[in-house]
Image (cartoon, rainbow, N blue to C red):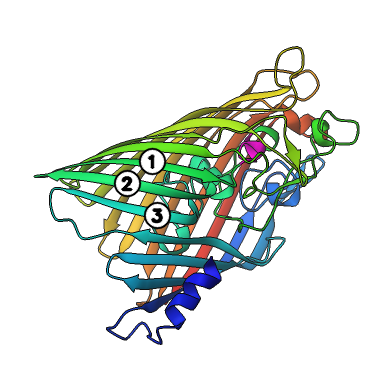
Amino acid sequence: MAAGLIALCAGGGATAGDSGLPRIDWEFWGDLRLSATSGEPGWLDGGFGKGRYGGRLNGDRDDGIVRGEVAQASILAKPVLAWGLTGLVHVKYDQVQDKPADLVEAFLRYRPAPSSNLSWSAKAGLYFLPVSRENTGPAWSSPYTISFSALNSWIGEEGKVVGAELRGTWRSGGHRLSATGGVFGFNDPIGSLIAWRGWALHDHIPGAFSTVPLPPVPSISEGGFFEIQPDYVNPVKEVDNRPGYYVALDYDFDRRFRLGFFYHDNRGEPTTFRDGQYSWDTRFWVATAEANLPGDVRVIAQHSQGNTQMGKPYFGRQPLDTDFGAGYVLVTRSFGAARISGRVDWFDTDDRILIVRDNNEEVGYAATLAAGIPVTRHVGVMAEWLYINSDRHGRRYLGLAEEQDQHLVQVSLRLHF
């Protein structure tokens, strides 16, 4: 689909500077990162660490690690095929992906000009579930912090679908009410990371063909209940050939106050296993509140609760049955082109069965403080301090204490052309 979108536009012979259609508008988003971390090894290194980067525990000594890397380099093609018909193709390079260059999103959107108070739009392709209120920047980045909230970090990991969406909006005065519905596939493994690894706070967005590592928990180790599960998850995967759906309702008053509710059900058949991946039966909801306050202050709050189940019934129950929840409150203030943001996160999982053999329960919280400033029109700098505290029984399987905390300080040089 990505190749097709670009080919359609290339055939028109227009560039971003032409006034005719079709055309392609191009963007580049780059992130050069310097970080210093403490605490346990990170989840990208096969541990239970909650940040994008982890530390190194040496007995009772905590050896921090300083890193420098290209955190991301993204090319975004934005075809404009006709009035109201646009698209997006997002290809990303990330050196920690198992496929360093990968496709992140590829979709078409049709949004005709409204002729009354009622308007509508449609979208189809590969895209993120419409949940996040943080990730409004280029390449699904956040203008507020470097690391996303626990909730939206998970959406970035497991919340991509191949589907179709229809959205209708009614406007009257300063009031705006929107209803959204979508049908999708290729989202069957969602829930794997929450149950086996737990929550995390980071900005690593795996591509559609990339995998995400799992820690060596007993149930997926040799002799475990799910030993045929590889030590990784491929989040964008169709396993059971059953479509899922989502619905959303949003209310906006004068662009100053907004409420939203989102519900997702992938309708997974939890006993199906194919090509190294299980199908998970995962449902969750997300409630959102946003407010633009005097003094250029903006507040965003989201909370989610859900459940995921997987496996052939064991004494009438799925052997893996996990309730989960996460939320955050973010406060941000702009000072001209500069911005300071703070966020508090909370998260938990409740393992409802077989906890004696493989306990996946978790509870934790995090605090984030970030500041960003533009250097030139195309270059900006953002610095962030992130503290995470979590208590997870599964760390005992790696010989670690259940409760761990981690400090992460990082600086991002952001390039946008």
- Provide the residue span drawn in magenta: 188-194
Indicate the amino acid at tag 2.
Arg
Residue in the image at 55% along x and 68% along y: 91
Numbered disc 3: secondary structure: strand
Residue marked by disc 2: 167
> Which residue occupies the extreme top position in the image?
315
Q: Which mark is residue 123?
A: 3
**Depicted 70 relative to depicted 255: above or below:** below
> Which residue occupies the extreme right position in the image?
223
CA neighbours of label 2 inside 10 A, class few (<14), some (14 to 19), many (20+): some
Q: Are marks 2 and 1 in contact (CB under 8 Å)?
A: yes
Q: Are marks 3 and 2 in contact (CB under 8 Å)?
A: yes
Residue in the image at 58% along x and 51% along y: 408
Locate residue 202, reporting x and y percent: 56, 50
Label 3 to label 2: alpha-carbon separation:
9 Å
The stretch drawn in magenta includes residue 232: no
Numbered disc 1: secondary structure: strand
Q: Which mark is residue 181?
A: 1
Indicate the amino acid at tag 3.
Lys
**Depicted 43 relative to depicted 323: above or below:** below
